[in-house]
């Protein structure tokens, strides 16, 4: 047992490693990035309504292609605020059609995430039973519909801090502690490399924590800053935080000045707080550490109907210029980096429905802005090979093929079918090949391709065309129907009764089944 021998002879190595790990500052340990690759270097997230509130209903597959991530809104409690059980029923969809649309978007390289909460989704995990109900029900929803992850959009009174719960690094309030435990359990179940965890709190629950922290003051609202312990405890598995920079009152920034919604100034100040870090409740001994730029997404309403604090395209992009490029505003200078945060993840909007209602102003304008920041990452990943390639029908001069669609990290744009020196290009999952020679064996190869020119490993199928005149050679274990024609021993026969052929039932031996033509 070599491993045991080495461990026995050099215990000081193990001790040294343990000491080094334990001596790391906790904020460095928590800052280790997730293992799976980013959706996009610059991501646009949009919430999709699982209801119709006047903005208009959209099928998932009809969401603007400018979005990288679609948050399905919302899964909600089914048995009261404190039971923990979450349910989800697709609006105007059958389960099968909804799953199909989720898979359709994923085949286009999109991520589809289930969001829990919203204005009507109060969730208080005030017991371990509620926590377990939450874990089990959320896990079941994700597995049933094939979602890529979970977005925590707790609002209202879902999160709060009990009096005396003043250390965001070591929370004691049950609704906080149980939520942290539930999120880590769900993440562990699916695997960090495959599962996306995001959060969409309001500024009240995050940035207000700079001025007031609910568990440490008497006069303030006990919900102030209540997301901070959840963010801190899950920062190693958190893909991104998309604070809602709308429906908010004035918030104090790191310059100790109030900033008002709807302006570039507000967005720069709010994001800079997350990327600089800040003393919670202005206590220098309780510092909330900065998030990575790729963990921060700027949350915005898509139009004036979507929420208070709508910001014009020009003002949003002024804010992005300051945050990403370091083009400072006269009213606020970023504290964490005066040269900008080029790795800022992107933007989020409520919602894809309001975006369509507003003629796609948000998605078109900000997609163009983000794409222009840097050349797109080259797509070098080939699609998967087609599967289940079959010959649906054939004649003496033609063959019709079909197959199951391939998948790709961006999108499959078409398929090539080759046979001999010939190639046929199609966009769907069927192909009709004509101009073939009768009674001849052909090998067809089907490959998928994407827009970058990447081509999949190829699937082959051999097909023999029918004999001239439509009759094909008789064979055993074939289902024949009335008037089918076959050739056998130099003669042509017509089927008289439907049957499945067997050895010994050759046409010359069973005149009840076959008639010489």
Image (tube, rainbow, N blue to C red):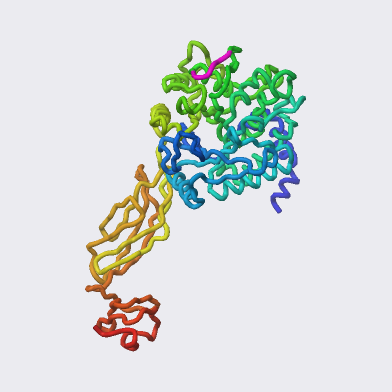
Secondary structure of the magenta portion, mostly? loop
Location of residue 416 in the rendering, given as x and y in whole percent from the top left corner:
32, 53
219 or 469, which lies in front?
Answer: 219
Q: How many numbered marks have been drawn onto this rendered protein structure?
A: 0
Residue name at image x 59 percent, y 18 percent: 251
Residue 448 visible, this orientation: yes
Decide if residue 435 is on the left or right side of residue 199.
left
Give the extent of the magenta segment. 258-262
Rendering quarter of residue 179: top right
337 sits to left or right of 367: right
Q: Position of residue 436 (x, y in %)?
A: 24, 65
Residue 259 is covered by the magenta coloring: yes
Quarter of the figure with residue 362: top left
> Which quadrant of the figure has residue 170?
top right
Looking at the image, the residue that sits furthest to the front is: 54
Q: Is residue 343 visible?
A: no
* Image quadrant occupied by the N terminus: bottom right
From this view, report whether residue 379 is shown above or below residue 471.
above
Residue 45 position in % (x across, y down): 49, 34
Q: Position of residue 84 (x, y in %)?
A: 67, 41
Front residue of 50 and 23: 50
Magenta span has 176? no
Residue at the right extreme?
164
Quarter of the C terminus within the rendering: bottom left
Above or below: residue 516 compared with residue 266: below
């Amino acid at each position: 047992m070599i491993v045991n021998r080495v461990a026995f002879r050099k215990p000081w190595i193990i001790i040294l490693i343990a000491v080094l790990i334990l001596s790391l500052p906790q904020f460095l340990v928590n800052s280790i990035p997730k293992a799976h690759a980013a959706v996009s270097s610059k991501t646009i997230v949009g919430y999709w309504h699982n209801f119709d509130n006047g903005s208009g209903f959209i099928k998932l597959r009809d969401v603007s292609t400018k979005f990288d991530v679609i948050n399905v809104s919302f899964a909600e409690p089914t048995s009261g605020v404190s039971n923990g059980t979450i349910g989800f029923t697709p609006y105007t969809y059958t389960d099968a059609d909804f799953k199909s649309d989720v898979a359709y978007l994923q085949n286009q390289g999109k991520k589809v995430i289930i969001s829990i909460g919203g204005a009507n989704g109060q969730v208080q995990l005030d017991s371990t039973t509620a926590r377990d109900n939450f874990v089990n029900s959320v896990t079941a929803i994700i597995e049933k519909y094939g979602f890529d992850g979970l977005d925590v959009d707790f609002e209202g009174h879902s999160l709060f801090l009990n009096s005396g719960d003043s250390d965001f690094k070591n929370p004691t309030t049950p609704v906080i502690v149980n939520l942290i435990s539930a999120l880590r359990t769900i993440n562990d179940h699916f695997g960090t490399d495959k599962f996306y965890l995001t959060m969409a709190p309001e500024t009240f629950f995050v940035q207000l924590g700079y001025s007031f922290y609910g568990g440490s003051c008497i006069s303030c609202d006990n919900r102030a800053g209540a997301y901070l312990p959840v963010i801190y405890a899950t920062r190693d598995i958190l893909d991104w935080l998309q604070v809602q920079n709308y429906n908010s009152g004035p918030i104090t920034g790191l310059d100790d000045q109030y900033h008002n919604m709807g302006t570039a100034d507000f967005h720069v100040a709010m994001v800079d707080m997350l990327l600089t870090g800040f003393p919670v409740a202005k206590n220098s001994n309780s510092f909330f550490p900065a998030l990575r730029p790729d963990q921060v997404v700027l949350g915005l309403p898509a139009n004036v109907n979507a929420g208070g604090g709508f910001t014009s395209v020009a003002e949003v992009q002024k804010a992005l210029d300051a945050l990403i490029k370091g083009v400072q505003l006269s009213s606020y200078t970023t504290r964490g980096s005066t040269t900008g945060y080029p790795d800022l993840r992107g933007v989020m909007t409520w919602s894809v429905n309001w975006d369509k209602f507003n003629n796609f102003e948000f998605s078109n304008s900000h997609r163009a802005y983000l794409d222009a920041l840097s050349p797109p990452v080259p797509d070098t990943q080939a699609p998967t090979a087609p599967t289940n390639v079959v010959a649906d029908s054939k004649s003496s001069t033609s063959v019709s093929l079909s197959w199951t669609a391939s998948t790709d990290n961006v999108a499959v744009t078409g398929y090539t079918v080759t046979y001999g020196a010939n190639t046929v290009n199609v966009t769907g999952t069927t192909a009709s090949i004509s101009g073939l020679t009768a009674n001849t064996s052909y090998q067809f190869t089907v490959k998928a391709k994407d827009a970058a020119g990447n081509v999949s490993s190829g699937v082959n199928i051999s097909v023999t065309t029918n004999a001239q005149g439509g009759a094909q050679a008789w064979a055993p274990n074939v289902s024949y129907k009335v008037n089918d024609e076959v050739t056998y021993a130099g003669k042509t026969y017509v089927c008289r009764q439907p049957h499945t052929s067997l050895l010994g039932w050759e046409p010359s031996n069973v005149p009840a089944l076959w008639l010489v033509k």
